[in-house]
Image: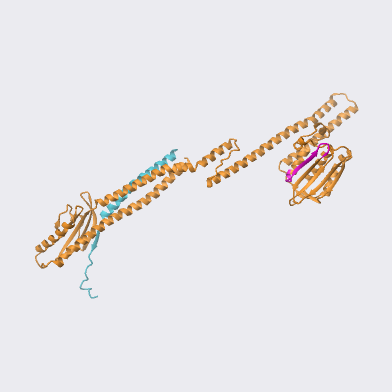
Chain colours: A orange, B cyan
Amino acid sequence: MKLWIKQTLICLMVILLSFSACLYLFVAQQAKQQLDIAAESNIQNLEVFCEHLSTLDRTTTIDYTADAVTRHALIQYTFSTYAHLLQSTERSYSLVVDGEYLYNISAWQPLQLLTMEDPVISAHCMATADDLPLMVAAKTIRILDTLATVYVVQDVSATLDQIDALTRNAQFALLFCLLVSAVLLPLTLRRTLRPLRTLTQASEKISGGQYALRTGIASRDEVGELSRSFDHMAETIEQKINDLQEQAQRREMLLGALTHEMKTPMTSIIGFSDSLLSMPLTEEGRMEAAHEIHEAALRTERLSQKMMQLISMTDCPVLVKRPLAAAELFETVRGATANSLEEKCITLETHCDAASVTGDSDLIFSLLTNLIDNAIKASPAGQSICLSAKETATHYALIVADHGSGIPKDKIALVTEPFYRVDKARSRKMGGAGLGLSLCRMIAQAHGGELHIESQEGEGTAISMRWPKEDAHE
Amino acid sequence: MNKKGLAALLALLLLAFLLLSGLSWMTERIIHDRSQNAVLVTATPPPTYDNYYQ
């Protein structure tokens, strides 16, 4: 069942029950009040009549000891005089003495409607005669030493008609309320629940691949809050999916580039090993083939090592940051790159403006050796490379500057991409895999910083890693 | 609307019908009760000779 139908039915049920309860109470109270008023009016008429009749005792000069027939005749005459004056089509008066009518011109028999037995002196009730609702009141009074019972019978059809009319009106009111509610409630509820339909459609479309879709519902109620929360969730999902797609694309490219890079040393290994196996070579030729195979195998090993580092950096590396003495760090790097520096007679100058930097020692070491390795490859023999550590109030910086061939301006943005090399032939010849700067960029990013490259073609390159200061972790 | 919804709607309509007809029944009951009950007032008996001086 749809939510709006369920809500409509529940609301209709609540409205019906609550409105009915109010109407029932109101109608019951009104009906009782109308009947009470009719009964009270009848009793008052009776009292007034009896008051008038009792004046006979004070005004007459007849002797109480006179015979009963004379007294009865006088009472009857006085009664009929007042009765003619006060009775109407709805109301009639009767007089009963000794259980018999002394006067009764009404169509009803009051004695059958209300029985007065000793010691009852007054009574009233509601009765029905000839399908007419009647209000009967009776009172026994002593007049001229005679016990007489006065009856007043009032036709209360008009009162019951009023009660019927009230009941009908209440029924119409209940029916009208129910019909209006049955028309208005679905319209209102459907309108209220429209944002939920929008949300459902949006979620279906998002699950179908439209990640950029938003509901855009701006209401301030709970549905608006839900929509905003939904939009935020959709945005997060879109971002995550974009990140995952980007990551998958990067990995795919990386794999493709790796396969391509592996082909070159493998071709050398296969070619030279084939020559060794199938061709009669001289000792010098065999040595040369073995050397080439050895070089290709070393290149493959370096490639695989760099790839391992790169992959470990991609998969959320766990950094162990601690303060590193800059001078000590630089000496370690110098020792690691000493052979390469000596081969090209390049001097490594170090400047420690910052006494220490905070970071992961292994990664910082790897970054510096990679940058210096690149600088050595780019620099001509006899030049110098400058390695410096700087510090500002908020950041650390490690800079490697060379006076080498430099990088063309349009290639600067590309050199940090995996397997990208400015001069492919020269780089491969020098054993480069095109992964060093990618690794350096990832190390900088892992420290929350960035790798900044400044280069002038033919003048040299300065690559710096800048990262924010924070508390060192042991 | 499914079977559950139809059943709920029918129940609602039946309840509305019962409540509507119940109003007439209630007023008839009030009138009927009033017809059944007569209000009687009796005279206070005068004190007897035996307990008059007590």
Give me the residue at 30% from left, 51% from top: B29
Q: Is residue B37 visible?
A: no
Residue furthest to the bottom in view is B53
Place of residue A60 in the rendered image (x, y in percent of width and height, measured from the top left): 12, 66
Depth check: give the residue in front, A435 or B42: A435
Q: Is residue A187 above or below residue A297?
A: below
Image-based side of A212 in relation to A418, left or right: left
Between A49 and A21, the one lying in front of the other is: A49
Q: Quadrant of residue A333?
A: top right
Exactly how many numbered labels are in the figure? 0
- Can you see residue A379? yes
| Residue sitting at the far top | A279
* Residue A473 shown left or right of residue A276 in the figure: left
Residue B51 position, x and y percent, is 23, 73
Q: Quarter-wise, where is residue A314 in the image?
A: top right
Q: Whole-percent x and y of residue A411?
A: 77, 35
Asked if the magenta segment contains residue A454, the reply would be: yes
Residue A440 is inside the magenta segment: no
Q: Position of residue A177 (x, y in %)?
A: 38, 46
The picture quadrant where one finds residue A94 is bottom left
Q: Nearer the viewer, residue B42 or A208?
A: A208
Residue drawn at point x = 80 percent, y = 48 percent:
A390
Q: Is residue A229 above or below residue A303?
A: below
Q: Is residue A137 above or below residue A243?
A: below
Magenta residue span: A445-460
Lateral position of residue A386 relative to residue A469, left or right: right
